[in-house]
Image (cartoon, rainbow, N blue to C red):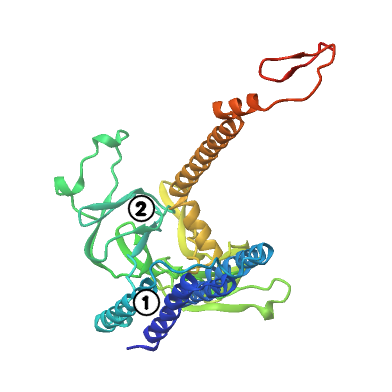
């Protein structure tokens, strides 16, 4: 039994017994205090689930504000002690406690024997994106087994992150169809077309990677660049990975320049060979001047580079096509900067809760709100009808009361302007 499991069992027992004492206590103040203990236990469970924001909300809102309101009402009404009287079922409390104890023993044995503390969290499916980084190469379609994951991907373009099933795949890259009517394009797998690239690919759970189509138009290669989308320690930082995808060039250096003082320039990634990627660089959100160099020669410079916080940027050194010179295609050194995916928010944080509520659970929340509104309106209407019915019943005088009123003599002398009715009541004058 792990310490975490033992701690959970102890806190769960406190929560259950505090809830039971809240129900059986004859003192309203004591009952409210037991409820506070139960709410604190729930907040502790949130902490064990790595959700500190929910734990603080539980303590501040429920164990704090709402319980203060309860105590205020109890003290205002003077209902510290519940009404007296003999209990009709005196054996019920003892029987409930005995059944609860047996239930707790059974659950304890089941939890210990089930080795819940040794269970691992459910792994997340792998995520992958594909980037075309070969100038003057045709657009491509990318398949994983029989599933197409990228269609008509041309130079400089990239796909969004895709959730895939873990396992081993056969990755196939075909030249994209050039017909204007895309519906007439045949499936390359069905017609047996020869792929430009065919290689095995293994996708592991909890992995995120970008796959770059690099090399030359006649010799395509696939580069695997891992991405880190875990929550950063500093919310005001971003991650940057530099990839050398420029063939026919030797090792390059990636430098953070200081234009005011060249001596303060810093080499962030040194001696990157073709096909290599740097380790993820963690940089604060700011404006930077970067430079790629090869053997002291400047290749390409990036001025006023900035990025959003909590993202993983991908900077690919490549070659961009230029207009045809003397009938032959030419290239110039350039870089590719695909859109950067955002890092996941920490579990239980305000951002994560807000995203889940406003995306996954927005429609159910709205439906529940409409149902509660309709229920509240219906309850108000039913209560109003009941109040009106009781008020009418109170105002209606029964025939027996009318006969008693007629039998009571009235010793009042009617004035000249009044007439005495047969019922003994005086008719009001016209004045």
Q: Callout 2: few (<14), some (14-19), or many (20+) C-alpha neighbours within 10 Å?
A: some
Where disc 2 sits, the SS reads: loop
Nearest the camera: 339 or 376? 376
Q: Residue at x 33, y 75 (%)?
A: 95
Q: Nearer the viewer, residue 389 or 343?
A: 389
Residue 177 is drawn in which quadrant?
A: top left
Is residue 303 positioned above or below 149 on the image? below
Residue 159 percent coordinates (x, y) = 39, 54
Question: At x 43% / y 73%, what residue is drawn?
Answer: 277
Q: Earlier in the sequence, mark 1 or mark 2?
A: 1
Give residue 20's quadrant in the image.
bottom left
* Residue 35, x across and y down, in percent: 53, 71
Picture coordinates of residue 162, whole percent (x, y)? 36, 57
Please identify the quadrant where the C terminus is shown.
top right
Q: Position of residue 321 (x, y in %)?
A: 45, 52
Q: Is residue 50 visible?
A: no
Which label sits on residue 216?
none
Q: State the residue position of label 2.
A: 137
**Of 56 and 100, the residue lying toward us:** 100
Determine which residue is flagged by label 1. 94
Q: Does 181 sit above or below residue 282?
A: above
Dot 1 lies on which element? helix
Q: Could you give the CA–CA distance between mark 1 and mark 2, rounded to whole angstroms?
A: 81 Å
């Amino acid at each position: 039994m792990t310490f975490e499991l033992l701690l959970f069992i102890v806190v769960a027992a406190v929560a259950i017994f505090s809830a039971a004492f809240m129900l059986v206590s004859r003192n309203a103040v004591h009952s409210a205090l037991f409820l506070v203990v139960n709410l604190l236990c729930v907040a502790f469970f949130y902490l064990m689930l790595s959700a500190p924001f929910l734990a603080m909300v539980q303590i501040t809102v429920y164990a704090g504000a709402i319980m203060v309101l309860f105590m205020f009402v109890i003290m205002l009404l003077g209902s510290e002690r519940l009404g007296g009287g003999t209990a009709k079922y005196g054996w019920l409390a003892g029987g409930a406690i005995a059944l609860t104890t047996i239930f707790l023993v059974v659950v304890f044995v089941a939890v210990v024997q089930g080795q819940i503390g040794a269970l691992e969290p459910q792994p997340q499916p792998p995520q992958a994106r594909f980037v075309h980084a070969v100038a003057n190469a045709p657009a491509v379609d990318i398949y994983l087994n029989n599933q197409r994951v990228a269609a008509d991907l041309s130079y400089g373009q990239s796909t969004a992150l895709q959730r895939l099933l873990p396992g081993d795949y056969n990755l196939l890259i075909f030249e994209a169809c050039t017909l204007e009517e895309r519906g007439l394009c045949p499936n390359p797998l069905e017609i047996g077309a020869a792929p430009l690239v065919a290689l095995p690919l293994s996708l592991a759970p909890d992995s995120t990677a970008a796959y770059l189509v690099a090399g030359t138009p006649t010799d395509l290669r696939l580069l695997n660049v891992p991405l880190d989308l875990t929550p950063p320690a500093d919310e005001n930082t971003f991650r940057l990975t530099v990839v050398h995808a420029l063939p026919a060039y030797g090792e390059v250096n990636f430098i953070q320049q200081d234009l005011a003082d060249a001596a303060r320039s810093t080499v962030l990634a040194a001696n990157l060979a073709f096909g290599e990627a740097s380790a993820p660089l963690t940089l604060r959100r700011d404006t930077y001047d970067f430079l790629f160099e090869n053997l002291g020669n400047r290749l390409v410079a990036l001025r006023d580079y900035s990025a959003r916080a909590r993202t993983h940027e991908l900077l690919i050194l490549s070659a961009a096509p230029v207009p045809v010179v003397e009938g032959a295609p030419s290239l110039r050194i350039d870089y590719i900067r695909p859109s950067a995916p955002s890092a996941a928010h920490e579990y239980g944080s305000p951002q994560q809760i807000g995203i889940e509520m406003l995306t996954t659970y927005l429609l159910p929340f709205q439906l529940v709100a409409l149902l509660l509104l309709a229920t509240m309106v219906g309850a108000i209407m039913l209560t109003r009808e009941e109040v009106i019915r009781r008020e009418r019943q109170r105002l209606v005088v029964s025939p027996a009361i009318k006969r008693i009123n007629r039998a009571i003599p009235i010793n009042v002398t009617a004035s000249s302007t009044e007439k005495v009715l047969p019922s003994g009541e005086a008719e009001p004058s016209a004045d």
